[in-house]
Image: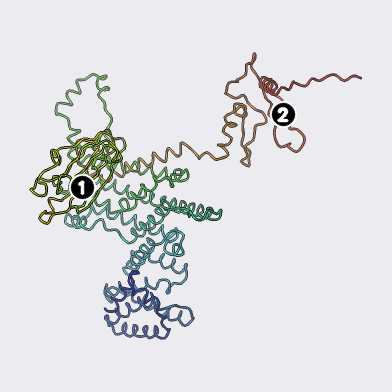
């Protein structure tokens, strides 16, 4: 156990023992061979204590003291790997869970030594991902490896040397995503199938995330954070540096698009299962149906819908990811997810008492409706209530902004803070009833503006507890709301007096104030239901992507330069056609433009019916565009050149 504790201490990079162990000389091959001999003898004798100790020794040796550079070392590594796999694949009645866990930790610690090539590691991971459900040892090894990779990935920046090692390829990510989708569907299904007691125990275990889900979260956070937070090097403005940053950003966006597509596809399956389970519970007659429907939303937060989707939706709203390529690829999936979430949220809402009372009608309503005329019934028809009916969406400023000093304030303490709520006509301040200062000149001054040069609104100081000046400034600290016109307020507090020895903390508590943009303080502690919040987030993202698709590609610099030329009616009168190779060129036989002519003509212009013959020369590929006579007349007037006159030749 001392060795085990040493291994745990060495796992921390912040402790001196880590650097000490890392500087030790590698262990020799015959020493590792002796360790394998002890392991083989212990396995034959069934000595679990020695087996556990040797497994911990393997973990330390693989992590710090071994380097398989020679052929003899590689033979010893293969022997060690066979012993570990023999223990891992042993039947459950022959090996305890503690030894199985130590085996998994040993393999994970020596992953790069036991499997030196990328192909070998990928084959191992493919094995544990595909066969993990059938074997408990492989399942535990999968969890240990993915947990370790997730922790390492969070500490590495995109494009680093170890990034490719910790971030698995698309095929392995697909296997992991399938496991996460299956786990999420099973978890949601349990809300319908398990007993009442098991359902209560299930609620107490969520929202714990599995190792596969934790790894997907790490990959997603790794890619998204680097995309959003990536900044070019200000000290290096060379073309190669800018080109490298551009390639890195493009690679990041490609990786995010691939991952987002897979996650949204998986969420589609989970939401479909959620809708089926919700419908089945609503139609069932079990005694605890209301409790299960209420707990279903909590269970849903523990799936990939709660751990992956909200972070992805929020990140995709960042300007770095609001691209036409992203919108074009993700839009169909977003629309499908909006439908699933809104429909399921409405199903759950129809079971709430508030919704039933909202849509309930008196018993005589059907009779009265039957007596109404058809026109009256048409006028009284209303839109079917949606999942937002009866819900109050909290505004960002509804919870208020709290401004406060330290408690208690100290000598020579100064405090200044400005609160700004955009769009607010006025601000309402509510002070804590514990506000106090030692003397009335240890005061708070409030200004209606962004600085202390703004208009002064009020000032408060002192206490009524019988200490210090035994008085308060003005009418004392306010008990009611204080109204400040405008959208900005500044607080300035200064402790000018020194604390006396008999002044308690409550007489020098300082102040605390909550700033809101409305007079009534609405209760926003509960927030929106999870599925409603998810449906709104998906809807906002879908609308943003639709706007990108509607606007189309961004205007290039060449198009900006040629804006005047592109707006010219002369150019717009040409009929353009696309050649087989994608090149755009003027049509050989132009057709009249729908744009009206800006020149005055007495008669309607008609294009000649004969085929235009290209001129002979270097530009024989370009077709000739015949302009209307009216335009030619105007061009000659502007240029000052008259139409050439052809004189008959004299013979």
Q: Residue at x 36, y 62 (%)?
A: 150
Q: Position of residue 59 (x, y in %)?
A: 35, 75
Left/right of residue 30 with respect to residue 103 in the rendered view: right
Q: Which residue is mark 2?
A: 612
Q: Is residue 405 above or below residue 613?
A: below
Q: Nearer the viewer, residue 382 or 614?
A: 614
| Residue 13 occupies quadrant | bottom left
In the structure shown, which secondary structural element does the residue marked by tag 1 occupy? helix
Q: Residue 413: horizontal and vertical position, in percent? A: 23, 52
Name the colouring of the figure.
Answer: rainbow
The quadrant of the picture occupied by the N terminus is bottom left
Using the image, determine if residue 627 lies above or below residue 262. above
Q: Residue at x 31, y 35 (%)?
A: 423
Asked whether the residues under the numbered discs 1 and 2 touch, taking CB atoms below 8 Å apart as contact, a structural biologist would say no
Front residue of this view, candidates 205 and 437: 437
Q: What x and y, as percent, mark residue 372?
A: 21, 20
Measured as percent of width and height from the top left, residue 300 is found at 27, 51
Q: Which residue, given by chain and number where applicable, does mark 1 sit on?
A: 294
The kind of secondary structure element at disc 2 is loop
Which image quarter: residue 93? bottom left
Q: Residues within 10 Å of mark 1 (few under 14, many from 20)?
A: few
User: CA separation, marks 1 and 2?
Assistant: 77 Å
How crowded pointer 2 is (Cα within 10 Å; few <14, some 14-19, many 20+) is rated as: some
Q: Would residue 201 be found to the left or right of residue 582 on screen?
A: left
Q: Is residue 35 visible?
A: yes
């Amino acid at each position: 156990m001392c060795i085990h504790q040493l291994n745990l201490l060495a796992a921390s990079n912040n402790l001196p023992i880590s650097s000490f162990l890392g500087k030790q000389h590698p262990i020799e091959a015959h020493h590792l061979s002796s360790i394998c001999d002890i392991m083989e003898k212990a396995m034959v004798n069934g000595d679990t204590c020695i087996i556990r100790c040797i497994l911990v020794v393997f973990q330390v040796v693989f992590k710090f003291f071994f380097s398989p550079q020679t052929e003899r070392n590689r033979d010893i590594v293969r022997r060690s790997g066979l012993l570990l796999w023999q223990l891992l694949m042993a039947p459950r009645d022959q090996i305890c869970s503690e030894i199985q866990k130590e085996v998994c930790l040993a393999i994970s610690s020596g992953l790069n030594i036991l499997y030196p090539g990328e192909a070998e590691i990928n084959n191992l991971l493919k094995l544990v991902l595909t066969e993990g459900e059938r074997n408990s040892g492989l399942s535990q090894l999968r969890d240990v490896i993915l947990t370790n990779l997730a922790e390492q990935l969070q500490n590495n920046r995109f494009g680093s040397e170890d990034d490719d090692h910790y971030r698995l390829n698309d095929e392995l990510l697909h296997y992991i995503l399938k496991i996460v989708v299956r786990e999420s569907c099973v978890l949601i299904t349990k809300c319908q199938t398990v007993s009442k007691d098991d359902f209560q125990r299930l609620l107490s275990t969520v929202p714990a995330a599995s190792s596969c889900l934790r790894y997907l979260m790490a990959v997603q956070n790794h890619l998204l954070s680097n995309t959003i937070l990536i900044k070019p090097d200000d000290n290096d403005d060379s073309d190669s540096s800018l080109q490298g940053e551009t390639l890195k950003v493009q690679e990041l966006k490609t990786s995010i698009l691939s991952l987002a597509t897979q996650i949204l596809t998986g969420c589609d399956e989970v939401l479909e299962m959620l809708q089926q389970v919700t419908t089945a519970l609503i139609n069932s007659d079990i005694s605890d149906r209301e409790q299960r429907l209420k707990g279903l939303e909590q269970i849903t937060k523990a799936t990939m819908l709660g751990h992956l989707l909200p972070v992805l939706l929020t990140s995709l709203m960042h300007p770095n990811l609001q691209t036409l390529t992203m919108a074009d690829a993700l839009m169909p999936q977003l629309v499908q997810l909006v439908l699933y979430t809104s429909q399921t949220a409405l199903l759950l809402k129809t079971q709430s008492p508030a919704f039933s009372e909202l849509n309930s009608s008196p018993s005589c309503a059907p009779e009265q409706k039957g007596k109404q005329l058809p026109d009256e019934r048409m006028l009284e028809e209303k839109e079917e209530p949606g999942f937002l009916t009866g819900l109050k969406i909290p505004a960002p400023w509804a919870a208020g902004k709290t401004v406060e000093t330290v408690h208690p304030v100290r000598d020579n303490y100064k405090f200044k803070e400005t609160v700004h709520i955009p769009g607010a006509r006025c601000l309402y301040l509510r002070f804590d009833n514990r506000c106090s200062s030692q003397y009335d000149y240890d005061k708070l001054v409030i200004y209606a503006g962004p600085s202390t040069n703004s208009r002064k609104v009020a000032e408060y100081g002192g206490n009524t507890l019988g200490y210090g000046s035994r008085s308060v400034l003005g009418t004392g600290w306010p008990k009611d709301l204080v109204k400040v016109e405008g959208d900005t307020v500044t607080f300035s507090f200064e402790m000018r007096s020194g604390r006396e020895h008999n002044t308690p903390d409550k007489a020098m508590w300082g102040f605390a104030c909550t700033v809101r943009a409305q007079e009534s303080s609405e209760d926003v502690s509960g927030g929106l239901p999870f599925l409603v919040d998810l449906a709104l987030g998906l809807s906002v993202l879908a609308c943003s992507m639709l706007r990108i698709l509607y606007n189309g590609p961004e205007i290039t610099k060449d198009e900006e330069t040629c804006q005047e030329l592109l707006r010219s009616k002369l150019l717009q009168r040409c009929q353009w056609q696309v050649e087989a190779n994608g090149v755009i060129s003027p049509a050989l036989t132009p057709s009249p433009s729908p744009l009206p002519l800006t020149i005055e003509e007495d008669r309607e212009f008609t294009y000649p019916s004969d085929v235009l013959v290209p001129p002979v020369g270097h530009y024989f590929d370009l077709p000739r565009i015949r302009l209307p006579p009216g335009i030619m007349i105007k061009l000659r007037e502007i240029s000052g050149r008259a139409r050439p006159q052809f004189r008959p030749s004299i013979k």
